[in-house]
Image (spheres, grey):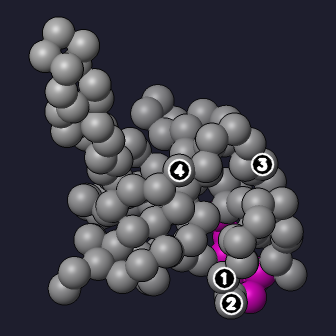
């Protein structure tokens, strides 16, 4: 049985609860999603249960009255029930949670769009 995590527009994955043994899964585990909900492009999937996403944004430079493009990388927890669905290049939605490890404080909620293959 999947749990409703309380974020509009996010639907739980179609996986049985006994297949996902992840304690940090927002749908089948005990971890709550609270705080920021953001999105980014998956750039790395080398670590176990971890992906790196890149968030692009523009920053205004007052001295030159111009904008510059910047990006930041976030380490996010990838639950077992979403592991087979997410690939490099996909646009994913992530939500903030408690610290899961030294660098991970976000959890992947769902895939928004497929990457450019």
Where does label 4 land, which residue? 38
Is label 4 or label 2 in front?
A: 4
Where does label 2 land, which residue? 14
Whether residue 39 is visible here, answered yes or no, is yes
Where does label 1 land, which residue? 13
| Magenta-colored segment: predominant secondary structure | loop
Q: Looking at the image, tell me whether mark 3 or mark 4 is earlier in sequence order.
A: 3
Give how far across and how far down residue 28 sits, in percent: 76, 69
Q: Is mark 4 on a helix, strand or loop?
A: strand
Left of 48 or right of it: where is 96?
right
Pointers 3 and 1 in contact (C-beta within 8 Å)? no
Q: Give the range drawn in magenta.
A: 16-22
- Image quadrant where residue 8 sits: bottom right
Tell me the distance, in whole angstroms, between the alpha carbons under discs 4 and 1: 19 Å
Pointers 2 and 1 in contact (C-beta within 8 Å)? yes
Quarter holding the N terminus is bottom right
Tell me the distance, in whole angstroms, between the alpha carbons under discs 3 and 1: 16 Å
Q: Looking at the image, tell me whether mark 4 or mark 2 is earlier in sequence order.
A: 2
Single out the residue that lies furthest toward the top. 63
Residue drawn at x 69%, y 38% as measured from the top left: 35
Left of 46 or right of it: where is 49?
right
Q: Is mark 1 on a helix, strand or loop?
A: loop
Q: What element carries label 2?
A: loop
Whether residue 100 is visible here, answered yes or no, is no
């Amino acid at each position: 049985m999947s749990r409703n995590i309380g974020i509009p527009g996010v639907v739980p994955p179609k996986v049985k609860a006994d297949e996902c043994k992840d304690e940090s899964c927002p749908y089948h585990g005990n971890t709550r999603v609270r705080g920021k909900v953001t999105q980014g492009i998956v750039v790395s999937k080398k670590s176990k249960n971890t992906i790196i996403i890149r968030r692009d944004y523009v920053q205004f430079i007052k001295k030159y009255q111009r904008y510059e493009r910047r990006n930041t990388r976030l380490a996010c927890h990838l639950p077992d029930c979403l592991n087979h669905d997410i690939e490099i290049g996909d646009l994913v939605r992530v939500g903030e949670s408690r610290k899961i490890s030294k660098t991970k404080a976000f959890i992947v909620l769902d895939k928004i769009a497929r990457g450019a293959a």
